[in-house]
Image: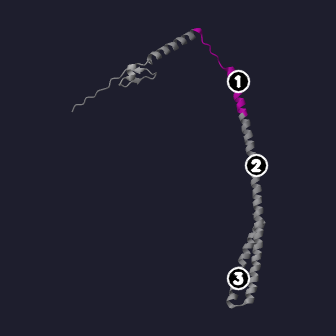
Amino acid sequence: MNTKTMEGLVGARTNIELLNTPFRVFKEARRKGDTETMKRAMGYVNDFSDKAQEYKEEADVGMEEDAKAAREREKLEREKAIEQRRKEREELEARTEESKDTDNNAEKSANKEADTVEVSKDGKVLLKQTVDAQHTDFEQSTSVNPQNVTGSEPVTYTAVGAVCPPAQTPTISVSV
């Protein structure tokens, strides 16, 4: 807190409290009808009131200075935070670039060290025969029987999509 602000607040409060005494004297003199004492008491009230007003203005000036200083401190803190975030971002980008470089180097070295596999002619022929056999089996098992499509009986399909023969429903007999 600024010294002007503290001095202004304390001075204004003190002078307002000091107003109570001459004002009390004024009220008592009014009851008695003593106009000279009333005038003298009102002079003191006006003096204390004027001093309190001066201290209030001093406190206002001090508070404006405090606010200005607080804005400057806040601005400096914001600039520091922005600079710190900028540095962090640059460090993060540098680390990202390093990790990309190490990943690329690791991929290059992995590509150099990778084993290669060649399939022989006999293996290719065997693979083709196996694939053709599976394809033919699949076509035969997935052929649609029009009777099953329009029939009223439920149809069950296998995992490969072939129609399974209808299962027998179990019968339960109960005797009492």
Decide: marks 3, 2 in contact (CB < 8 A)? no
Which amino acid, by three-letter code, is at mark 3?
A: Phe
Query: For residue 46: magenta?
Result: no
Q: Residue at x 40, y 22 (%)?
A: 149
SS at mark 1 in the image: helix
Q: Is residue 132 visible?
A: yes
SS at mark 2 in the image: helix
Given this view, does label 3 or label 2 mark the residue nearer the observer?
3
Which amino acid, by three-letter code, is at mark 1?
A: Lys
**Left or right of 105, for residue 140:** left
Which amino acid, by three-letter code, is at mark 2?
A: Lys
User: Dividing the picture into quarters, in which one does residue 109 lie?
Assistant: top right
Tell which of 48 and 110 is nearer to you: 48
Q: Position of residue 168 (x, y in %)?
A: 33, 23
Give the residue pinned by disc 3. 23
Q: CA distance from mark 1 to mark 3?
A: 95 Å
Given this view, does label 1 or label 2 mark the residue nearer the observer?
2
Give the residue pinned by disc 2. 80
SS at mark 3 in the image: helix
Label 1 crowd bin: few (<14), some (14–19), many (20+), radius 10 Å: few
Which quarter of the rendered picture does the C terminus lie within?
A: top left
Q: Is residue 7 visible?
A: no
Coloured how?
Answer: one colour
Q: Earlier in the sequence, mark 1 or mark 2?
A: 2
Report the span colored magenta.
Answer: 97-121
Q: Residue at x 48, y 14 (%)?
A: 136
Give the residue pinned by disc 1. 108
Which quarter of the rendered picture does the N terminus lie within?
A: bottom right
Q: Position of residue 3 (x, y in %)?
A: 78, 66
Label 3 crowd bin: few (<14), some (14–19), many (20+), radius 10 Å: some
